[in-house]
Amino acid sequence: MKTSITALSILTLLCMVTSAFAADTVNGAGATFPYPVYSAWAYEYNKITGIRLNYQSIGSGGGQRQITDRTVDFGASDAPLKPEKLNKEKLLQFPAVIGGVVPVIQISKIKPGQLKLDSEAVCKIFLGEIKFWDDKKIKDMNTNLSLPHKEITVIHRSDGSGTTAIFTTYLSDTCAQWKERVGAGKAVKWPVGIGGKGNEGVANYVKRVKNSIGYVEFAYAKQNKLTYALLKNTAGTFVVPDIESFQAAAASGTFDPEKHFYLWLTNAPGKNAWPIAGATFILLAKEQKESNRNTVKFYDWAFKNGNKTAERLIYVPLPDSLKNLIREYWKKNDIY
Amino acid sequence: MAVLLKKNPIDILFLGITAIASLSVVLFIAGILYILFTESSESIGKFGILQFLFSLEWDPVQELFGAATSLFGTVVTTVISLMLAIPIAIGIAIFVTEISPNILKGPIGIAIELLAAIPSIIYGMWGLFTLAPIMSNYIEPALQKSIGKVPLVGMLFKGTPMGIDLLTASIILSIMIIPFTASIARDSFNLTPAVVKESAYALGATQWEVVKNIVLPYSKLGVFGGAVLSLGRALGETMAVAFVLGNNHQITSSLLDAAATITVTLANEFTEADTDIYLSSLFNLALILFVFSFIILATAKIFLLKAEKRYSR
Amino acid sequence: MTVEKRRQIESAVALSLSTFAAFLGLFWLIFILGDVLVHGVSAMKLSLFTEDPAPPGIAGGGLKNAFIGHVLITLCATMIGVPFGVLGGTFLAEYARGRRIARIISILSDIMVSVPSIVIGTFIYAVLVKPVGHFNGWAGAVALAIIMIPVVLRTTEDMLTLVPWTLREAAFALGAPYYKVIIQVVYRGASAGILTGILLSIARVSGETAPLLFTSFNNSFFSVNMNEPIASLTVTIFQYAMGPYDDWHAQAWAASLIIMIFILILTIIGRLIIKWRYGKR
């Protein structure tokens, strides 16, 4: 009896003591879209400064929810919040990096960059109207490929996702039927398909399910050697998803600090612009000045030192002029 | 026992502490009910209890929510997994109690218990990496070629065999509940008095006749209770199905389609619901799951108690 | 065919079906255990225990944070769950023995044992995460403790009931107060059984994932601060197995193997104790 009581007290003590080890940690959660680059930055940052930035990729919906509930130090979302909503929830918002969403497929013998699609085809596939890979619509665009008569499995996100918001905004803008039947948002009512959790889950399912199509941030496609498709943009050219075409899309927009940088980059004009690009945003709780300073310090460091890492993962670093606008925005809100 | 307590104040203190500790269980149940109810009040207020239960909507864009699609997945996976698991579990119980030589009884008993101890996340992961490819490459196409051709029943096996669907999820769930059901069935079988069995053998009954006419009728309450208990377990299982169900809110006639259960919906969407009504609807789902499984588990418990009472005399 | 013959055949068929079922059960066990073993062993590396995770898509790194976090959460859950469970069981078996309240609480505990664990996760999110303002290890530990309490409570109750009443009477006759009798005589008599219950309850909660998803959350860095999000093996397995990276999959298998070995050992020890202590009767 005595021994067990002693054991229990030691245990209790242990648990209490551990709580005292409060090291420098910044907790963030949200979008899975920038997860590869944030965690690569955090890894380097931790090696240099010893500060730990714990970023959990739970989805943009989660990022917005958790920062609204103040359960994290910062939230991340690829779908920007409207200025009115930000003011209502007392949040700040700034972009961190720009990336592109790409359609990824798994069809035997088809290699990355071979399949061409336009927004109508993508829309109809995700609506369930185009059911087979050898549908006339797809064949006409890809006369050089031999497409199998296999049923298409659509893979989408099961969680609240900014990647989905960017993707469905693209579809809503280009495809009337989509706008009417489904609409745009972080989570929508999918007509067909199976849902994967996070960009990670979609990439995993596309890898494992034959004749499937999904959409992921380009870093996931690249890291996992998934087969991506070319897309026809508003200028009518089939563009390759790469850093140049994402940059071309990024160059088309102007971020306005007055609107908390609210901006979509889908269907950007420009001959070589990738049609499904987007910035990913950081959300801060206005009143948490102390933790905001830590978060901002990290992103300031990343803006200065993180461009290489971002480019290696095919994200587009923000242009310097925008970085300075963001620094002014921080100053204005007394967190820099 | 009150007599013993009179003298000693420490005794009264100890009594108090233990009483509080045991009442904590009641408090948790009441607390869970209360919290889930208050958290889902917004959703209940907006959609109504019955409407929410039967609404097919799960549309975060329009902010319309209903439990029907998640309930559908929960009910289908649970029912199919029970249909697969119960015959096998009873078979195992018969083998262990009536057939197996004594040397095998121990090891098989342990094996079954170990199977029950494997965490559900391992079942889920194994399902995604190992079972799903087998299903999509071999079993599902084979089913489509055979049963799939039969009118009406064939409907159940339409669509692309992708291995991430209701059927795979149900099979994993059934593997998970087999040991559980089997061990309860075994315990019930063991309650059959040896005298009765021996008299039947003396009359020249075969082994199967003894099982069929003596053991099974004798233990049917217990076996039924065990089956209901497994039902309760299967209802609330999350991780074993989360990997292979495909997370799609839809009601479908084919077992080869993706679906969602209440538990999977919660696991996927709980931390990411952005609007209040969304989160409140998820709490509402949790409340429904809690109430249903509570009722089912209570029913199972009543049957098991009855069985125990009847035969322990 | 004679009736006799038909009965024999029927019996043989039914019995072989049962035998088949038993071996089917064994087959799954061997299949799953073997699969985890093969994949897990091939992914086993020393760096798994000594390093924190590398960023996704970059090979290397380990799960040190998750191992330590998992042990910590489970220990703290045990610390909360065991006293509640043992004391609660004591009340049912001793002070309230034979009373209606004991019966009701013990039935409710049996039900609580099987209540969906994800529901407990949502409950704890509402009471210990949202009000506190951040995900934290304590919330995870409490969620696991709530699952643990009814298990420990019921085994304690059963084990205390097994201690012969005459033993208590002997102690009463010496003038000992009831609490002393319980602590010094009854607990001693039932200690092996209670220990088994505790071991099995630890085995049960250490494989739980669902209640940790919304409570202790996850942390990609090493942390022992229970007031913060903390990594756990099971949540990490969920994230890694769902993810697309081969490296993640390998680590998820390795982590599964370790959790499985841990749980199987606890379960076997628990069974051995029971056999050793109660098997002879």
Image: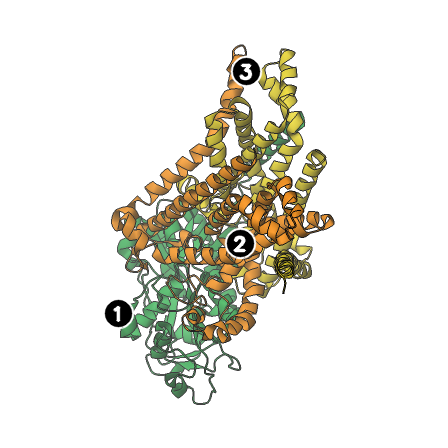
Chain colours: A green, B orange, C yellow
The reply, left or right, for residue A7 in relation to residue B44 is right
Q: Residues within 10 Å of mark 3 (few under 14, many from 20)?
A: some
Amino acid carrying mark 1 in the image: Glu
Q: Is residue A223 left or right of residue C34?
A: left
The count of marks equals 3
Q: Say whether mark 2 and mark 1 are on the same chain.
A: no
Q: Is residue B116 visible?
A: yes
> Pointer 3 indicates a residue of which chain?
B
Q: In the image, is C142 to the left or to the right of A176? A: right
Q: Position of residue B231 (x, y in %)?
A: 47, 50
Q: Secondary structure at mark 3?
A: helix
Q: Residue at x 59, y 39 (%)?
A: C75
Q: Residue furthest bottom?
A: A144
Between marks 3 and 1 in the image, the one whose residue lies nearer the viewer? 3
Chain of the residue on which disc 2 is drawn:
B
Q: Which residue is mark 1?
A: A180
Pointer 3 residue? B10
Rendered image: mark on residue C140: none
Q: Position of residue C89 (x, y in %)?
A: 54, 29
Marks 3 and 1 sit apart, C-alpha to C-alpha, by: 73 Å
> Is residue A222 among what the camera can see?
no
Left or right? Give the position of A233 relative to C223.
left
Q: Eyeballing the image, is B136 above or below C212?
A: below
Amino acid type of the residue tagged 3 in the rendering: Ile
Residue that mark 2 sits on: B86
Residue shown at 61%/58% (left/top)?
C14
Point out the frontmost of discs 1 and 2.
2
Label 1 crowd bin: few (<14), some (14–19), many (20+), radius 10 Å: few
- Give, as a three-letter code, the residue at label 2: Ile
Of A2 and C100, nearer the camera is C100
Question: If the image is split into quadrants, where does the N terminus of chain A sit?
Answer: top right
Label 2: few (<14), some or many (≥20) within 10 Å?
A: many
